[in-house]
Image (cartoon, rainbow, N blue to C red):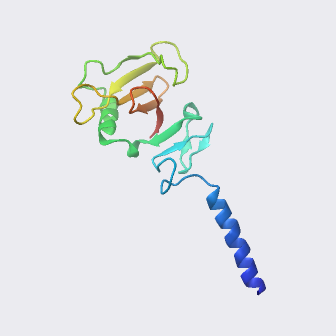
Amino acid sequence: MSRALAGLLVVLAVLLTGCASGTSTGTGAGPDASTVTAPRSGPTAAGASTPAWAGGMTTVRESRLPVEARGTLALIDRGGPFPYARDGVVFGNFEGHLPEHRRGYYHEYTVRTPGSRDRGARRIVTGQGGEIYYTDDHYDSFRAVLR
């Protein structure tokens, strides 16, 4: 085998090994491309900077949220009006999935669920420090929203 071919095979093996041990791109098993587990701080897998408050949490880009969640965020940005009487109430974080803060730090907003006869399970929770979290399973899990 020629030296050039042997060198090419070594480079190919290194590249394939690096790809196999990298993060999921959403094309196979594992998390889809809309979510990544954020490092403590620094860039996400997509290259955007992850805020310190999202450290260690699964993240989702705002653009990857359901259209109804993006609509709820637009209402929050505008200060309302909100369609549900409970929108903007204090979120107690009784499940303990979000970082611990004093009562009143977090507020929750309903994300409409098409076909649901009630408020459904989807919520946006905001923190007074600018944090935004999304849950689609009624507080069993959260993703930090990256804007």
Q: Height in image: 29 above or below 54?
A: below
* Quadrant of the image containing the C terminus: top left
Tell me: 127 left or right of 110. right
Estimate the x, y position of residue 101 in percent, counting from the top left.
53, 17
Tell me: 76 left or right of 19. left
Tell me: 118 left or right of 23. left
Residue beneath the point at 41% across and 31% down: 135
Q: How many marks?
A: 0
Residue beneath the point at 50% across and 39% down: 59
Q: Height in image: 136 above or below 11?
A: above
Tell me: 144 left or right of 73. right
Give the quarter of the image for residue 42.
Answer: top right
* Quadrant of the image containing the N terminus: bottom right
Residue beneath the point at 57% across and 40% down: 38
Estimate the x, y position of residue 136 in percent, counting from the top left.
38, 33
Q: Height in image: 40 above or below 11?
A: above
Estimate the x, y position of residue 120 in percent, counting from the top left.
29, 28
Estimate the x, y position of residue 79 in percent, counting from the top left.
31, 26
